[in-house]
Each structure stands twice: as structure tokens, then as C-alpha cells.
Amino acid sequence: MFSILRRAEHLCARSAWCMGAAKIKSLGSRPETVFVREWLRSPRLAGAICPSSAALAEAMAGGVPDDGTGLVVDLGAGTGAVTAALLKKGIQPHRIIAVELSGELSGYLRKRFPGITVLRGDAAELSGLLPSRPVDCVVSSLPLVSFSEAQREAVVRELKLILQGRPLIQFTYLWGGSYLADKGLVCVNSRLVLKNLPPARVMKFI
């Protein structure tokens, strides 16, 4: 699996390099273009070789409870694929908080989704970023497997503090997710999404 990802990452980098930064910039502000610019700036922080597909985003949004009134945190929101799926599902904009570390992506999210709250910050400091309101669910696109063990522990510690037993939805390119189970979170649902590059697994933890 890792060899496939490395090969795909190499092809993506080669294509972007051949296209050139000026050409990429000229393509405008489409989500795919913004994603490529961010990937070129910091591949490891981007955590993916392509933006999340609509099928993956909808699978993640589908795990959010239908009867909630609290906040829904879109963690590692990127260019907003999951954000768009949350809005499509019917989550009211005032309930959605998108958290993104990248300054460029944070600015892009504010322009693309003016009705939601966008916070720029580190997931390892999540409890200090969020307003003092109940959180119904966290939908995470963070590339946790590429984090150091210390970073991963810090993020999971924050998630547990915020959620207090409410659901976490996380997608992974590894078909296991044991890094979260090992931290005491229990997987209650798992779904493979083939319509994504590469295929991904959406997991729901409590």
C-alpha cells in the first residue's frame, strides 16, 4: 500500500513540476488548484496526494448525528470537500467550525464558505481554539499516520477532552486505524470508499 502511495505522490509531484508554478497560479482558485499549490508548499502537511473525492466527503458527513444541535468540527478542513458535504447534509452553517493549520487554506475556506466559522490553528491545541459550546461531532481529515507519536498523542488527548464520548469520524488510507484504537477510542463503524484516490476507509470512533 505504501509503495502505491509513494508512486502516486511521485507522479503528482512530477506533473506539478512540469506544469510550473506560474501555470498552476493561472488556473485560479478552484479547490483542486488550491490543493496543488498547498501540496507543493508542504506535501507532508497536506497529507494526501489528491483532494478528497465527493464520495469520501459524503461518507464522512454521513456519520454526523442527525439530531444534534451542537458544533460540528471539520478538522484539517483543507479546501473544504468535507465542509461542502456537511452543508449538503443539512448541517446549519453556524454549527460548523472548520479548523485548518495552513494560512492560505484558511483564507480560501473563509471566501468559499462565508457562513461558517474558520479557525486557523493546530489540532494539538484544539480545546483552546474552540468556543465554549458543546461539540456534537468531530470530522477529521488529519493525516495522523504521518504525525510523530508525540503529535498524535497530543491530538488524541485534545479530541478526548472535547468530545467526552461523542463521535469522531476519521478517514485513513491505512485499512486499520489501530493508531486511534490503541489510544482507547472504540471503532463502532467502518466503511471503505473506493471512489477516492487512493481508496480510503472512513471510521467512526467513540
Image (cartoon, grey):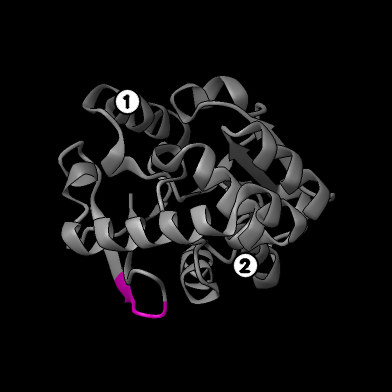
Judging by the rendered image, the residue that carries numbered circle 2 is 85
How dense is the environment of label 2, judged by Cα within 10 Å: few (below 14), some, or many (20 and up)?
many
Is 127 positioned to the left or the right of 94 in the image?
Answer: left
Amino acid type shown at disc 2: Ala
- Residue in the foreground of this view, choosing between 7 and 171: 7
Q: Main secondary structure of the magenta part?
A: strand
Residue type at the position of mark 1: Gln
Q: Residue at x 43, y 24 (%)?
A: 124
Expressed as whole percent of the image width and height from the top left, the position of residue 188 reads 27, 61
**Is residue 64 rendered to the left or right of residue 93?**
left
The local crowd at label 1, few if under 14, some if 14 to 19, many if 20 or more residues have their Cα within 10 Å, is some
At a point 20% along the width and 39% down the height, the residue shown is 184
Q: Kindly report which numbered mark, 2 or 1, lies closer to the viewer in this rendering.
A: 1
Local secondary structure at mark 1: helix
- Of pointers 2 and 1, the one earlier in the residue sequence: 2
Give percent across and percent down for residue 182.
Answer: 15, 40
- Residue bearing mark 1: 151
Name the image quarter holding the N terminus: bottom left
Residue placed most toward the observer, 196 or 88: 196
Residue 187 percent across, percent down from the top left = 25, 56
Q: Is residue 109 above or below residue 15?
A: above
Residue 121 in view: yes
Q: Report the number of discs.
A: 2
Q: Which residues are magenta?
A: 191-195
What's the distance in space between the residues labelled 2 and 1, CA to CA? 28 Å
Residue at x-position 66% and y-position 55%: 24
Extreme-bottom residue of the structure: 195
The kind of secondary structure element at disc 2 is: helix
